[in-house]
Amino acid sequence: MGGCFSSGGMSGPEKKLVSIIQGSKSMNKRYKKGVQVESAYDIIMTGEDCILEKSKTGNTYKAIKKSDQNSFAVKILPVPKSIGNQSGLAELQALISEIGFMCKLDHRNIASIVEFYIEGGMVYSIMELMTGGTVMDTVILKKSFSERDAQQVFQQMLEGLQYLHSLGVAHRNLKLENLVLVRKGDLTHLKIIDIGHAQVGAVSNQADIRINPLYGSPEMVKAYLKRGPVPKPGAGPDMWSAGVILFFILGGYPPFYADQDSKILNSIIENDWDFDKPVWGNISSEAKDLIKSLMKFDARDRLLSKQALNHKWLSMEVAAEDLGDRRVEHRKYIKSKFKKAIYILLAIDRMQQVVEDIKSGKSKRGTVFKASSKKQLITKNEEADEGSKDGEEFLDANEIEVNLE
């Protein structure tokens, strides 16, 4: 595993971190004091797909426990090199906050830390490895998906969310990509991940606002666009995102989408969404009522997580038949997101061909790009949509993170 795992005397910041950890019951319980991480785990840090997840605070890798060969995930977070200035102190505080918060979590539907190690200027947080994939790729793209499946997934998400809210914490980045199945194909065990965005208390100013265009609530979007004040702390934005998620998994497409983020954000502010597409004709009125109750424009009118868990839809018998129209709407959504990208790819491909022709002597001039070529490619792409090859593109399309600078 290389020199970065070597031990030795702890730096000043590491000693400070350890002293704080030892004063916290929840953190000290999971801290493996005096134990080197390489003595307990083999961390896989090489190979094309060695990074399981990237984040601003640190990357996550796969780790094999030596004692039983079980697989885990390990997030590696750097300890600041110095705490002699405000920047270093802020970094140390952020690190302590993330570890401390994760150590306090104890819920079946929330990802948490199993144990952690400190050495070589790094913190190694060992977590359960979820191998089932995200709800985005294992449920939205599932060949057969019913309202009953949606009910099962959504109930677990609400239970995890209610647990966070009971601690006075808002997730702030709730989306399909942050809902993960523990085992592949098993809808009975889901966990909410990416708790690093979770926040206790209020957003201090507009510069701290982070939104995902597909899931952002009206009040957060208004604040982001500087058309409204920074919202007071509360569960409102999470509950809006929950409504968007339920809409998405039942309908196969999000309630707001367009070819530009600005158009999506304006649609959210205008509250421009409905159940007009054919897929909703096969979905119960109770499910639609829950979505409407979560996606109230005014955050004060939305159901809280505890209230949503008591909604009739979650306790009633719902249809187990496949929602076939979901896949039709899903394909339309993909095409709307990727038409522009297709044109770019075609242009690149054509330019490469022109360069090759010039080099080989077949052509001494450039070739004019014709609009008819675009149409041909779009037609081919629509034919390809009839298969199920859209998954990876769809996942990439939704990694849209906007941060106000």
Image (cartoon, grey):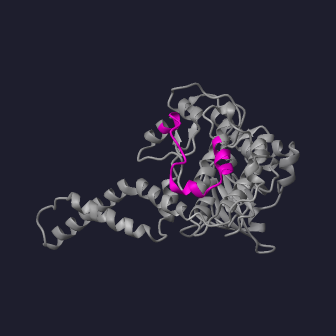
Q: Which residue is rendered at x = 70% and y = 44% of the image?
A: 95
Out of 271 and 221, give the one closest to the viewer: 271
Q: Main secondary structure of the magenta part?
A: helix
- In the image, is residue 280 part of the stretch drawn in magenta? yes
Q: Which residue is rendered at x = 62% and y = 40% of the image?
A: 295
Out of 18 and 47, give the one closest to the viewer: 47
Out of 143 and 285, give the one closest to the viewer: 285
Quarter of the image with the N terminus is: bottom right
Q: Where is residue 161 in the image (x, y as percent from the top left)?
A: 74, 47
- Magenta span of residues: 267-292
Out of 22 and 69, give the one closest to the viewer: 69
Q: Residue furthest toward the left? A: 364
Q: Where is residue 207 in the image (x, y as percent from the top left)?
A: 56, 31
Tell me: 122 left or right of 370. right
273 up-or-down from 191: above or below: above
Q: How many marks?
A: 0
Q: Position of residue 24 (x, y in %)?
A: 86, 43
Q: Which residue is rendered at x = 43% and y = 54% of the image?
A: 337
Tell me: 178 left or right of 269. right
Q: Which residue is rendered at x = 54% and y = 35% of the image?
A: 221
- In the image, is residue 334 part of the stretch drawn in magenta? no
